[in-house]
Amino acid sequence: MFPSLADMAVSLGNLGEQNDLAMKIKTVKSLKDRERIMADERERMQMVFSNSVFQSDPLKAIIGHLEATLPPPPNRPGDDQRMRT
């Protein structure tokens, strides 16, 4: 099983490299580019939907992915005090 979608991406091979390429595209200048991006995203969505972890508990898979990819929230003054009470 995959604890996060990031782990699933690693197991699927070159998905991470494809994701880097997709993230570099900031503006779409032609219909052909838009169609290519849509095809890539459709394929990525199908890989996620076919993943057994996502099928068994979609919210848990999404939360696990977010926890693995987002930085931890910054500590604010007084957070330690609130957690102790």
Image (cartoon, rainbow, N blue to C red):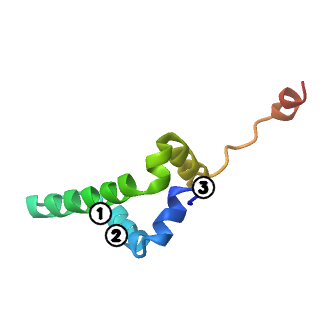
Foreground tag (3 vs 2): 3
**Which quarter of the image is occupied by the N terminus?**
bottom right
Q: Could you say which disc has been placed on residue 68 in the image?
A: 3
Q: Judging from the image, what secondary structure is the residue with disc 1 in? A: loop
Identify the residue position indicated by label 1 in the image.
25
Identify the residue position indicated by label 2 in the image.
21
Nearest the viewer among 54 and 26 is 54
Answer with the quarter of the image where residue 38 lies. bottom left
Q: Judging from the image, what secondary structure is the residue with disc 3 in? A: helix
Separation (CA) of disc 1 from disc 3: 24 Å
Q: Is residue 73 left or right of residue 50?
A: right
Q: Judging from the image, what secondary structure is the residue with disc 2 in? A: helix
> Compared to 37, does 12 lie above or below?
below
Q: Residue at x 50, y 53 (%)?
A: 53
Answer with the quarter of the image where residue 48 lies. bottom left
Q: Amino acid at mark 1?
A: Ile
> Compared to 57, does 2 lie above or below?
below
Q: Earlier in the sequence, mark 1 or mark 3?
A: 1
Question: Dot 2, how many residues are within 10 Å of its Cα: few (below 14), some (14-19), or many (20+)?
Answer: few
